[in-house]
Image: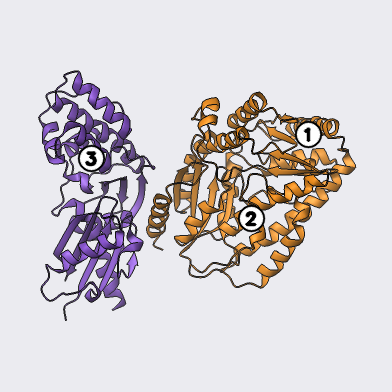
Amino acid sequence: MAKYFGGCDLGSTTGKAVILKDGEVIASACIRSKIDPIITGRDVLNLAIQQVPGLDRVEDLARLVGTGYGRNEVPFADENVSEITCHAVGAHFCDNSIRTIVDIGGQDIKAIALSDQGSVLEFAMNDKCAAGTGRFYEAVVRTFDVTLDEFSELSLKAKKIVPVTSQCTVFAESELVSLLYKRNSPADIAAGVQLSVAKRVFTLARRVGVKPGITVTGGCSKNKGLVKALTKTLRTEITMLPMDPQMMGALGAAVLASRNGHKSG
Amino acid sequence: MKQPFIPDFFCQLIDQPVNTLVDQAQAQGRKAIAYTCSYVPQPLLSVDGLFPIRVRAPNVVGTPMADTYMSSVLCSYTRSILELALEWAFDSIDGWVFTASCDHLRRLYDNLEYLNKPAFNHIVDLPHRSGEAAEKWLASEFRILADALSQAFGVDTGDQALAKAIKVHNQYLTLMREISAMRMEDNPPVTGAMFQTLLAATSSSPKDLLMDQLGELRDTLGKSEGVTGYRARLLLAGSHCDDPAYIEVMEKTGGLVVAERTCTGSIPALSPIPENGDPFETLARQGLENISCPRMMESFQQREEELLEAVKEYRAEGVVLQTMKFCDTWGVESGLLTKSLRKAGIPVLNLEREYTMSSEGQLQTRIQAFLESMGK
C-alpha cells in the first residue's frame, strides 16, 4: 500500500496541511484558524485528505508532523517540530539554492539562515509586538477599506512614498487616518506602509545575515507590494518558490514526516 | 522529560515579595535587610540578628508608576521592584542596601529614597577594577556600611561578629554547592527550574529558618531518581533571572538547564568564602574576584574563560544567553560572548526578555528551534 505523509501547520491566523507521496505533494489545504486549534487541525487535514483517492482518515497517514503555534494540538500527530525548522526544510525542499528565509506570518516575523544542506544555522524572531505581520496588515486594510490583494496592488501604483513612521499597529492605524485626511495619495501611503514593514524585516534579517538565495514565506509573502519593498531594503532579488509560500511550514513538516517515517520503517 | 519535584515548603516561599519566614523572623525581633545585587555582602547583612533578603517582584502586574518615575528604558527588574515598593509591598522590610553596580540599580536607590524613603537606605560604592587598591577601597566601603548598620539597628558588626557570620553563610553555600554538583550527573535529580526555586527561596528568606529543610532535601535528592528523556543539556547565562518559570519553559521543551552563569544563578554565587584574615578584606576580595559582572573593566577574558570552563564542567551542549531588555552591561557582553562561544564550537541562542515572563509560546518556539538546530 502507498505510504502517505502529512504535515500540518497550525498558525495564529490560518491552518495549513500538506500530504506527500513518493516525495511529491499530492494534496494541500489552507483554512482560517478557528477558536479551537484541534478543530482547525482536524478540518484542514480532512480537506487535504479528501483530495487523495484511497485515503480516508488522518489515522491512515504513515506519519504526521505538527508545526506552528498549535503544534502540540495537531490531532494524531506523531511528533511536533518548530515552524522555524519546518520553514527551512520546506523552502529548501522546494529550491535547494535557498540560504535565507524571511517568514512573515499572522503574528510573527522570522529571519532564518540556512546551511547548504538546508539546516537552520541561525534565526531571529520579533518579540511579542505584532507590528508588520498579518495582523498589522488586517488593521491597515480596514483603514483603507480594501481587501489585502487590493491593498497590495494599490501600493504598486505609487508614484512616490509617503513615510509611515509608526511601527505599532494601533499607532500606525491612526497615523494612516491622518495621512489620508491630509489628501495624500492612498497609493503613496500604501507604499509607505510596505516600506515601513520592509525596514523592520531588514533589521531582523541583518541579524542572521542576508545571503543570496533569499525567499519570503508565510501568508504575507502573497503581498507583492511588500515583496517589492523587500527587494529594495534587502538590496537583492527575492527568489520565488515554485509552490505557495504560505504552505512552507506544512510542507516542511510533511517532508520531515516522510524522512523520519522512512527512517523508522 | 520526566521531572522530579521540589517540596511545597520552598515553592511557597517565592510566591510573595516578602514571605512568611521573613515575617516569622521579624516577629522574633530580627531585622530584614533587602538587597538587589550580588556585590552586596550577604554575611555582613547576617550579623547579630540581621538577615538579608534578595528582593524579587513575583506577580507584578505592569509597571505604570515605575515607568513614569524611572522611564521605560530601564531594566524591568528595577522597575518591577519600584512598582511593588510603591504598592507598599516592601514596607515591612527594615532596611535596604544597594551597590552602585549599574546605573539601573542606582536609579532604583534614588527613586526609593525620593518616593518611599526606607528607614535605612544605604548604597555601597563599587570599583570597576579588581586588584589590591580596589580591595582596600571596597573593604572601607563595607566598613562604612557596617557602621551604618550598627548605628541604625544597634547591632554588633565588628570583625568577630562578621567572621562568625561568614562561617554560618559558608554552611549554606556548602549545602547549595552539594546540590548544584548533582547537576553534573547524566541524569541529575534536580532540574534547572528546581534549582532556581531553591536559590530564589533561600536568598529571599532568613537562611537559618530553612537550613534543616535544605539539608533534608539534599539527602533526599541524593537518593532520588534523576531526570530522563531530555534532549540537551543547556547552560543559562546573562542578566538577572530569578524566575523558575522561565527555566521551566526551556525544560518543558526538552532543554535541561544544568547551570546558570547569571546575576542570580549558581555560578559563581556559591563559591566558598575564606574564613581566615580580615573579614572585611576577605569579603571585598571575594566580591571583586568572584562575581565577574560584565560591569567590571579589563576582565572580559576572565569571564570568557569562566564560561567556557563551566560549559565543560557541566557538560553543557549549548548556551542560552539571555539579556534583560535595556541591561546595557550584559547587552554589550553577550555579543562578545556569542562570538567566543561559537568560535569554541558551542551553539548559542540569544534571547532578550523582560523581568516578568510573557509570550511563553514564542519562547518555546525559540528553544525548540535551537534544540532542533543542534540536531537534538
Visual hue assigned to chain A: purple
Residue denoted by label 3: A138
Q: CA distance from mark 3 to mark 2?
A: 44 Å
Query: B334 or B248: which is nearer to us?
Result: B248
Which residue carries the number 2 mark?
Answer: B12
Q: Quadrant of residue A247?
A: bottom left
Q: Is residue B131 above or below residue A38?
A: above
State which mark lies toward you, 1 or 2. 2
Q: How many marks?
A: 3
**Depth check, front residue: B35 or A173:** A173
Q: Evaluate if marks 1 and 2 touch, with contact meaning CB atoms under 8 Å apart.
A: no
Q: Is residue A183 left or right of residue A163?
A: left
Residue type beneath disc 1: Phe
- Disc 1: which chain? B
The three-letter amino acid code for the residue at tag 2 is Gln
Q: Amino acid at mark 3?
A: Glu
Q: Secondary structure at mark 2?
A: helix
Q: Nearer the viewer, residue A11 or B281?
A: A11
What's the mark number on residue A147? none
Q: Position of residue B48 (x, y in %)?
A: 86, 43
